[in-house]
Image (cartoon, grey):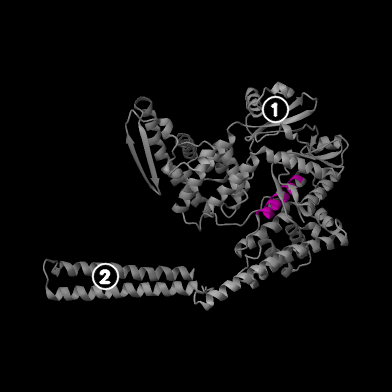
């Protein structure tokens, strides 16, 4: 396998490819929404300025594409009360989401004005290039940077060129003032920081859009790293997500859903990611669990958290000083073997994913370093989990490709998706899998390009309506990130070769038999419950049948297209009968000589002829254009 081929596919871990027109469609939809929102914003801003003098009230309603505004000057109006309500664009009333994150109408309008202004600066109405789109998202702030990072993994929304450019997005940010850090810590702990820390280094170790890390020393003498969340970052993200939900809702009305795929789903995925990443108690628990995992491996480590000092917005952990894998020259100078580091890192990662089912989901170079002869993994904010069944299926699919066994690969794919996802055309699924097996199964397992393989597999699953679990896509993204790290800094390590050897040698036959027995017991338990449920439902159906209450809904698969054709034929026939009736009726009126008369023809008859002519042209045009479309 040529290295260049793997780099070409590194960021190709996507859901599916789509036509390039989806970007222009998306941009035009965004532009329409931005223009619409800018109109609201301009009106609202004027009224807000008037409020300083006359306490004007505002009532703005947005219904689909119509924007109506109404102002009522009333000196008795209390703006503080009015601000507790939201625009109809964001929902008719203030919901629990807005209450939780203190979202007000005024703050949303202000943020919406900023978004619309930046969209105008980048001339969204005339389309976006990949570079321009990346720069615009960076200008919009951390929330939209995260949007771009998620969109870079969703090529069913954007073409590959845009996905590759958005993958370059970074979440670095200017450091927040040291005084803000101290005040945040004091607020979180409810006491002065000098009662907890002996010293906090004012210079941050790192600063991102979400949080900032400082080195510190506890009063008890421990050297620690303190990760402090930026004040208000969750509220800011919640506000942006609320606006994006509204934009996605309007965009799906402006543009057909066939052209923009589940924008709402992207926004909800974004918010789920935000919620987990902004709750530092989750990261503290992940650190504790991963620390226990590392205790079984002398060459692996991660920082130890201090649970008593961790809150939702602060996490305190051991400070570990080492050399990042992004500096291979320094590692070599320190006496480390790069190939040994890469081999142990990949083998341990295979253990995390395939044996334990709890793994680090963001292994970029900044999160991997070497200290004291150990590989140290940092930032456990993003992790993934796989159950036993999923891990077994992943192993099955890897070896199915190696053995060129399409039925086994199909079985694994369907086991991923679950029992409810049965393909309508199983032979077509096998035929497509034969193509994948022919392409990837003919190479040695050690040369398998996992990024390209996973891309092809997920594209195939989407074509056949098979939904792959999000945990599996998380594994795919994590493996591609790790593969990119190795190719850039430790190129002599073959990741898939190490993983395949790990699968072959990690478990003894007794362990494999034990796992299979456990899986059999679990599946038998589920099958028994399903059987009992089926018996109960059969009893209910039998009772309804004897009472004459049973109804059967039937769906004829493949009958939709013929029914649509029949519907078109009936519609055309109906219109033709109307045209004939109009011609006949108009002719009767003509010979009857009814007045008034225009151009020598009674007006009623003349109008009938015109309508009949227009309908005739419409019928002929409809038949002609639909016929051309079918030929294409």
Closer to us: mark 1 or mark 2?
A: 1
Instruction: Please report whichever mark, 1 or 2, sits nearer to the chain's N-terminal start.
Output: 1
For the record, the magenta segment spans: 470-485
Does residue 416 lie above or below 352 as drawn? Answer: below
Residue 101 % position (x, y): 54, 37
Does residue 213 lie above or below 16 as drawn? Answer: above
188 vs 254, left or right, is right
**Residue 481 is inside the magenta segment:** yes
Query: Which residue occupies the foreground of this view, 362 or 433?
Result: 362
Query: Which residue occupies the foreground of this view, 233 or 102?
Result: 102
Does residue 442 show up? no
The residue carrying mark 1 is 204
Residue 628 figure quarter: bottom left
The answer to whether the residues at label 1 and label 2 have Cβ atoms under 8 Å apart is: no
Binning the other alpha carbons within 10 Å of mark 1 as few (below 14), some (14 to 19) or many (20 upward) gives some
**Mark identifier at residue 612:** 2
């Amino acid at each position: 396998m040529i290295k260049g081929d793997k780099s070409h596919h590194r960021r190709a871990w996507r859901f599916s490819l789509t036509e390039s027109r989806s970007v222009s469609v998306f941009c035009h939809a965004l532009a329409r929404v931005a223009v619409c929102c800018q109109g609201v914003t301009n009106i609202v801003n004027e009224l807000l300025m008037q409020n300083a003098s006359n306490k004007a009230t505002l009532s703005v309603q947005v219904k689909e594409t119509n924007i109506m505004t109404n102002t009522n000057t009333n000196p008795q109006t209390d703006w503080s009360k009015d601000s507790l309500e939201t625009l109809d664009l964001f929902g008719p009333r203030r919901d629990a989401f807005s209450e939780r994150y203190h979202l007000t109408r005024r703050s949303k309008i202000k943020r919406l004005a900023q978004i619309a202004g930046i969209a105008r600066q980048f001339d969204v109405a005339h389309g976006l290039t990949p570079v321009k789109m990346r720069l615009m998202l960076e200008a919009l702030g951390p929330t939209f940077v995260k949007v771009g990072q998620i969109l870079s993994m969703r090529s069913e929304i954007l073409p590959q060129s845009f996905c590759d450019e958005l993958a370059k997005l970074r979440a670095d940010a200017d450091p927040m003032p040291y005084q803000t850090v101290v005040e945040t810590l004091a607020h979180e702990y409810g006491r002065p920081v000098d009662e907890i820390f002996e010293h906090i280094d004012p210079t941050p170790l790192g600063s991102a859009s979400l949080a900032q890390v400082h080195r510190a020393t506890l009063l008890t003498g421990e050297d620690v790293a303190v990760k402090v969340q930026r004040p208000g970052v969750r509220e800011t993200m919640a506000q942006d997500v609320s606006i994006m939900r509204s934009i996605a809702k309007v965009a799906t009305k402006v543009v057909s859903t066939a052209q923009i795929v589940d924008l709402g789903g992207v926004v909800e995925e974004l918010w789920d990611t935000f919620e987990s990443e902004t709750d530092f108690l989750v990261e503290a628990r992940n650190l504790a669990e991963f620390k226990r995992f590392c205790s079984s491996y002398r060459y692996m480590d991660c920082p130890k958290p201090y649970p008593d000092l961790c809150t939702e917005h602060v996490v305190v952990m051991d400070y570990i000083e080492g050399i990042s894998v992004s500096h291979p020259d320094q590692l070599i100078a320190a006496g480390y073997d790069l190939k040994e580091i890469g081999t142990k890192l990949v083998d341990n990662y295979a253990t995390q994913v395939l044996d334990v089912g709890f793994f680090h989901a963001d292994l970029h170079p900044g999160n991997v370093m070497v200290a004291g002869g150990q590989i140290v993994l940092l930032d456990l904010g993003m992790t993934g989990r796989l159950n036993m069944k999923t891990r077994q299926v992943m192993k099955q699919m890897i070896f199915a490709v190696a053995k060129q066994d399409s039925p086994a690969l199909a079985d694994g794919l369907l086991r991923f998706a679950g029992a409810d996802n049965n393909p309508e055309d199983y032979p077509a699924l096998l035929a497509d899998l034969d193509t994948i097996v022919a392409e990837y199964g003919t190479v040695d397992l050690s040369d398998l390009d996992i990024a390209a393989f996973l891309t092809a597999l997920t594209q195939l699953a989407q074509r056949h309506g098979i939904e792959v679990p999000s945990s599996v896509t998380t594994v795919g993204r994590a493996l591609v990130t790790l593969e990119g790290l190795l190719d850039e800094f430790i190129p002599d390590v073959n990741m898939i070769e190490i993983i395949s050897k790990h699968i072959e040698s990690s478990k003894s036959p007794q362990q494999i038999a034990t796992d299979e027995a456990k899986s059999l017991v679990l599946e038998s338990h589920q099958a028994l419950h399903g059987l009992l449920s089926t018996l109960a439902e059969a009893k209910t159906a039998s009772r309804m049948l004897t009472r004459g209450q049973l109804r059967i809904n039937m769906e004829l698969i493949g009958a939709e297209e013929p029914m649509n054709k029949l519907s078109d034929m009936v519609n055309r026939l109906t219109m033709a009968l109307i045209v004939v009736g109009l011609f006949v009726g108009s002719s009767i009126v003509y010979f009857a000589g009814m007045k008034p008369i225009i151009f020598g023809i009674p007006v009623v008859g003349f109008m009938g002829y015109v309508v009949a002519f227009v309908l005739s042209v419409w019928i002929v045009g409809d038949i002609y254009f639909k016929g051309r479309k079918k030929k294409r």
